[in-house]
Amino acid sequence: MEATKLRRVDFVFRPDNTSIDVLRKTLKRDADDIILELIDSGLKGRGGAGFLTGLKWKLAKEAAGDIKYVICNADEGEPGTFKDREILDRVPRRVLTGMAICAHTIGAKEGFIYLRAEYKFLAHKLKAVMAEMNEEFKKLGLDFSVSLRYGSGAYVCGEETALIDSMEGRRGEPRNKPPFPVTAGYLNKPTVVNNVETFVNCCIIANIGADEYKKFGTDNSRGFKLFSVSGDCSKEGVFELELGMTLADFVEEFGDGDTKAVQVGGASGFCVPRKKFKDTIIGFEGIPTGGSMKIFNSTRSMYNVLHNYLEFFEEESCGQCTPCRVGCQQLIKGIEAVKRKEKPAGYLDELVKLAKVMKVASKCGLGQSVGNAFVSIVENFREEIVY
């Protein structure tokens, strides 16, 4: 695997005054042509799952039915992630343009932004921009409009099928797959659900073209990404960086000189220790991330970090499936028992087995990802749990 050097770029937050021009140009293109360019660009979903965006749009376009929907997933609930908030606040027209391009491509007439409950302070501004853009869509001859829907503060509604259930007025719980939303999504109609940043990247690709976009990143991780940097760092905030850099380069740029671990991808991601920084690539060929990069220095207890994550997952589990509902409870009870010396250090190995079972047996990404942080922290910082 070849890594790129850490390089800052500036595409997402450029002045948001070209969106309508980009859309006007794109509406003249054939839908299949747009899909081929997206696939050629190598763009993968920026929410963290990494499914090819062009392929998702292709499946939705080919799905049977005259009624289709576009949903922007703005339920940014991953701990340590705050880049979508910045996008919606600073360049909302770029998001709406990406949604409109998707609507033109798959044949949708209605779109929604599913906004995280804690981001309701953005609603007034977003509604004004949506009203303005909906009028622009009409002027361009595009029969498409976007409206706002609100989340209720549930982490699990970041999962696309739980999000759809929530939009339909039910308790947000993940659905069985298949069928996938591209064939049976919102109101059982073909639906594209993409992350905020993904739609912005679609707008950028429509503007600069796939060939230019592919100049950034690696073969498996094309383009650039927004990173939410927090913790024990020299620079905190949202930074746009080329994909494919090593974690060592990242820490050199953003660490405080005493970094012992980086949690890549939030609570559901992997905790990487200092000894693995040079060999860890930030991208789909290494460790992918939805954006969260939490930096910890030597003053931090990794037991406390792990305990905090497990408390979060125990609280946010929807309780629908037993592996996640019971597993989260047992993991937190288990590490507490080891810390209190009520269980031997070897009991951690049994807990690791449980975490791995959860990864394959849980119904959705919440339960499946609990083991990422758990196993990586136990394997790399066992002594901080035992002693």
Image (spheres, helix red, strand yellow):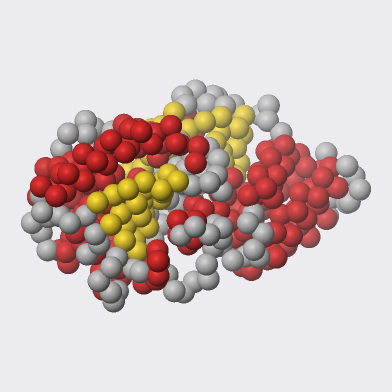
User: Could you tell me residue 205's position as x and y percent?
Assistant: 21, 49
- Report the quarter where the C terminus lies: top right
Residue at (60%, 41%) from the top-left corner? Answer: 273
Q: Residue furthest bottom?
A: 64
Q: Is residue 192 left or right of residue 75?
A: left
Residue at position x 70%, y 44% from top? 311
Q: How many marks?
A: 0
Q: Residue furthest right?
A: 342
Q: Position of residue 347 (x, y in %)?
A: 83, 55
- Who's the residue at 69% across and 64% down the image? 323
Near-viewer residue (63 or 144): 144
| Res. 49 image quadrant | bottom left
Is 288 or 167 nearer to us in this picture? Answer: 167
310, above or below 163, in the image: above
- Which image quadrant: the N terminus? bottom left
The residue nearer to you, when weighing 370 against 191, is 191
Please give left or right for residue 348 compared with residue 315 in the image: right
In this picture, residue 364 sits left or right of residue 139: right
Residue found at x 72% / y 37%: 304
Residue 181 image offset from top left, x and y in percent: 40, 66
Q: Position of residue 335 (x, y in %)?
A: 79, 48
